[in-house]
Image (cartoon, coloured by chain):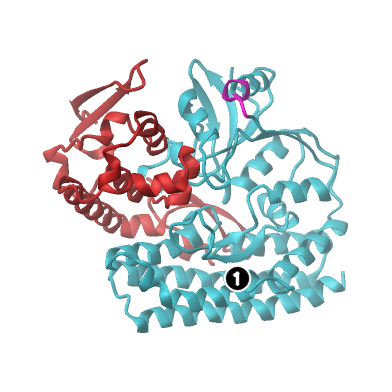
Chain colours: A cyan, B red
């Protein structure tokens, strides 16, 4: 059984990409940046004390699942979500839905997606894929990070859906029950943007938002003490590039995706000020991209002395300054809508 | 980011990036991964170095297979405990050479499941010399392939060594 009507497309980010593809399949024309923006996906957090992490890391989007929850809360889109304790029941329910032609999004451990190149695959229980068919022992997978429909053996999918650990999927899956005929963007855009502004410059702990960016710049200087050797430090510094560019961000740590959301919102609302903000956000993203290039270069050259890390920290602090100004301006703009 | 600056010609790893297009609109392009195109060799080199260093320590009985795979998979003790269902204090203990001798087979089975290897691989290192001298450790490109097939017996695996025909 293959759901032929499902159209596979790559997307910048797995969660917003999966959501967009399912909504389009259900007949609602909406773009990935719009989903990301309306779900207030943009974020920053520097995580150094999470017990499950073997090394500090930073996040650039809200917690997995939050995007869908916010979209559900803010629009009339109805989702059916399910979690399972029993692996057999989880598989049976998935098969049943596929059989009646419903594409289903599943949360999985990315490591087990064996159609993805080996160097990309890491253990991360926060990946979303859409199952769009089953042939024999293989499922057909629409993965935002893969150019065409992929296949995965049922045993691998089962393992990926029930991997333990931090944010364990526990067989989580969802599909869309109904979508509204249209979305009231005029009402939703200001609400969603204000939420993002609050996440970035509102009252938050010091490791979240713009303050979190500054914490990252500061704590980065201590990374050499946390690593086994120079290769380990190089690996962790080069991961800055991966987090900003390759791990489903759309480039520049989601800033390009958010800039596109602001551009689309400005067109829908016919608001020139929002258009100006979209250009500014694109420039902020360019700065993040420079950071990712720089991190990759010094990591590769093992040029990781205090001076280079300070230089990297300075570049990160400049982003914090630029973003602080940006969100204050955006607050004024959105206040006038 | 301007479209012309964003495009990376690298087919093995494609991704979507949002850019400013030539006509001034913002939208997605499909492009290649910058870091993989330029720095993949460095990644493999580091991985191979880490694996070889850990293997040497394993051979000298300085570390346990649990510690070996924990580092390869980039887990810490808490994450490994959650993935196996084994308490953290035991996970810590199982990484000590003396304690590993007393480990239960049922616990080994849980570790093997979390590390996605057969239980037998916790007691052996399969080394193919033709593959070993290459910095690139992408399995699909290695001249010799080691295929391990599970059986109905959870503790028995069939290991076949084949020439890569690709």
Residue B138 in view of the camera:
no
Total labels: the figure holds: 1
Asked which quadrant contains residue A6, the reply is top right
Label 1, residues with CA under 10 Å away: few <14, some 14-19, many ≥20: some
- The image shows residue A49 at horizontal and vertical percentages of 53, 63
Chain under callout 1 = A
Using the rendered image of the protein, determine whether residue A154 is visible from the camera's viewpoint.
Answer: yes
The quadrant holding residue B118 is top left
Image position of B48 with respect to B151: above or below? below
A157 displayed left or right of A177: left
Q: Is residue A157 above or below residue A209?
A: above
User: Residue at coordinates 79% horizontally, 45% vertically from top-left?
Assistant: A72
B110 vs A89, left or right, is left
| Magenta highlight range | A85-90
Residue B46 to residue B81: above or below? below
Quadrant of the snapshot with the N terminus of chain A: top right
Q: Is residue A88 magenta?
A: yes
Residue that appears at 46% across and 37% down: A113
Does A189 sit left or right of A13 as displayed?
A: right
Residue at the spot 67% in from the left edge and 47% down from the top edge: A65
* Image spot of residue B126 (x, y percent): 19, 35
Disc 1: which residue: A207
Q: Nearer the viewer, residue A6 or A58?
A: A58
In reply to whether residue A318 is colored magenta, the answer given is no
What kind of secondary structure does the magenta stretch mostly adopt? helix
């Amino acid at each position: 059984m293959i759901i032929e009507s499902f159209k596979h497309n790559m997307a910048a980010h797995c969660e917003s990409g999966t959501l967009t593809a399912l909504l389009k399949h259900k007949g609602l024309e909406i773009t990935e940046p719009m989903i990301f923006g309306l779900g207030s996906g943009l974020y920053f957090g520097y995580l150094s004390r999470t017990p499950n992490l073997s090394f500090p890391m930073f996040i650039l989007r809200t917690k997995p699942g939050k995007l869908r929850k916010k979209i559900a809360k803010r629009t009339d889109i109805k989702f059916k979500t399910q979690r399972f304790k029993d692996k057999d029941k989880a598989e049976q329910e998935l098969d049943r839905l596929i059989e009646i032609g419903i594409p289903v999004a599943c949360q999985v451990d990315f490591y087990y997606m064996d159609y993805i190149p080996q160097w990309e695959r890491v253990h991360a229980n926060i990946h979303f894929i859409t199952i769009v068919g089953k042939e024999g022992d293989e499922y057909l997978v629409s993965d935002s990070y893969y150019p065409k429909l992929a296949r995965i053996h049922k045993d691998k999918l089962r393992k990926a859906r029930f991997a333990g650990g931090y944010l364990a999927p526990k067989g989580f899956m969802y599909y869309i029950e109904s979508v509204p005929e249209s979305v009231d963007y005029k009402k939703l855009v200001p609400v969603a943007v204000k939420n993002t502004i609050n996440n970035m410059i509102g009252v938050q702990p010091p490791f979240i938002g713009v303050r979190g960016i500054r914490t990252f710049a500061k704590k980065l200087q201590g990374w050499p003490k946390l690593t086994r050797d120079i290769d380990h430090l190089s690996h962790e510094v080069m991961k800055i590039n991966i987090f900003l560019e390759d791990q489903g961000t759309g480039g520049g740590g989601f800033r390009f995706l958010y800039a596109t959301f602001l551009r689309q919102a400005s067109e829908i609302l016919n608001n020139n000020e929002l258009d100006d903000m979209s250009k500014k956000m694109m420039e902020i993203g360019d700065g993040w991209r420079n950071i990712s290039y720089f991190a990759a270069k010094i990591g590769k050259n093992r040029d990781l002395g205090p001076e280079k890390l300070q230089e990297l920290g300075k570049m990160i602090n400049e982003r914090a300054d630029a973003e602080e100004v940006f969100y204050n301006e955006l607050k004024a703009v959105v206040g006038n809508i | 980011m301007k479209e012309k600056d964003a495009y990376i010609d690298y087919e093995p790893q494609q991704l979507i990036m949002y850019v400013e297009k030539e006509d001034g609109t913002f939208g997605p392009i499909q492009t290649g991964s910058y870091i993989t195109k330029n720095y993949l060799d460095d990644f493999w080199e580091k991985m191979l170095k880490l694996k070889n260093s850990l293997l040497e320590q394993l051979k000298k009985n300085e570390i346990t297979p649990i510690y070996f795979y924990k580092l390869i998979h980039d887990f810490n003790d808490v994450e490994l405990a959650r993935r196996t269902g084994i308490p953290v204090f035991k996970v810590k203990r199982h990484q000590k050479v003396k304690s590993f001798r007393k480990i239960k087979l049922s616990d080994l089975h849980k570790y093997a499941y979390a590390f996605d290897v057969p239980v037998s691989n916790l007691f052996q290192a399969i080394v193919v010399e033709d593959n070993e001298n290459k910095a690139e450790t992408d399995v699909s490109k290695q001249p010799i392939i080691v295929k391990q097939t599970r059986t109905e017996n959870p503790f028995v695996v069939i290991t076949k060594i084949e020439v890569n025909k690709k």
